[in-house]
Amino acid sequence: MKSSDRNTESSGHDETVRILMDLSRLIRNLSRVSGAAEEGPAMTATQRLALFELGEGGSLRLSDLADLMGVSPPTASRAVEALYELGLVERLPDARDRRALRIDLTSAGKELLAERKAKAQTAFEPAVASLSAKERATLSDLLRRMADEIRATRS
């Protein structure tokens, strides 16, 4: 490998780390100002992830939820069990397979998710407003592309 190739590879690695650190800082700051983690029932990050995935995906089989979350079915099952005990999800029969169950948000789960999204939106609005319309569109496009690429490489 040529020295210039190593420098380019190292530079790409450094940029990846810098972007990850910037995203991490943004998420931590957003979490702090939105207060979402401290209010409502105590939940682990995995449980919050399950709540958000169910909010986006609607009623899902456990295996599909685990795939979306990027965790094993037993990990997803533990998260769902905790959310069930909190009254935030329900288990419903699958119309296509009577042996299977689908997981869906209860009214309380939908309400909690809506509250957390609203708090995060309120906390995030000033930062978004500080960007021009073009910057907002570019940022949105780039984040969507990166998320799609990560999901595609995981599949």
Image: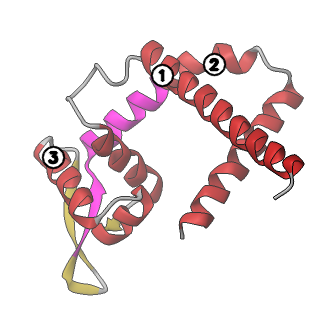
Q: Is residue 1 magenta?
A: no
Is residue 91 in sight in this rendering?
yes
Disc 2 is placed on an element classified as: helix
Q: CA distance from mark 3 to mark 2?
A: 31 Å
Q: Position of residue 38 (x, y in %)?
A: 29, 19
* Structural crowding at the residue carrying mark 2, measured as other residues with C-alpha within 10 Å and reported as few (<14), some (14–19) or many (≥20): few
Provide the residue designation for mark 1: 28
Marks 1 and 3, the one that precedes in the sequence:
1
Disc 3 is placed on an element classified as: helix
Provide the residue designation for mark 2: 125
Q: CA distance from mark 2 to mark 1?
A: 16 Å
Which is in the foreground here, disc 2 or disc 1? Answer: 1
In this rendering, would 11 be left or right of 109? Answer: right
Residue at 32% x, 38% y: name it: 45
**Where 89 falls versus 139 (above or below)?**
below
Marks 2 and 1, the one that precedes in the sequence:
1
Q: Quadrant of residue 102?
A: bottom left
Q: Amino acid at mark 1?
A: Arg
- Which is the main secondary structure of the residues drawn in magenta? helix
- Quadrant (top left, top right, bottom left, bottom right) of the C terminus: bottom right
Provide the residue designation for mark 3: 82
Which is in the foreground here, disc 3 or disc 2? Answer: 3
Q: Amino acid at mark 2?
A: Glu
* Structural crowding at the residue carrying mark 3, measured as other residues with C-alpha within 10 Å and reported as few (<14), some (14–19) or many (≥20): some
- Quadrant (top left, top right, bottom left, bottom right) of the N terminus: bottom right
In the image, the segment drawn in magenta is 101-119
Q: Position of residue 20 (x, y in %)?
A: 60, 35
Marks 3 and 2, the one that precedes in the sequence:
3
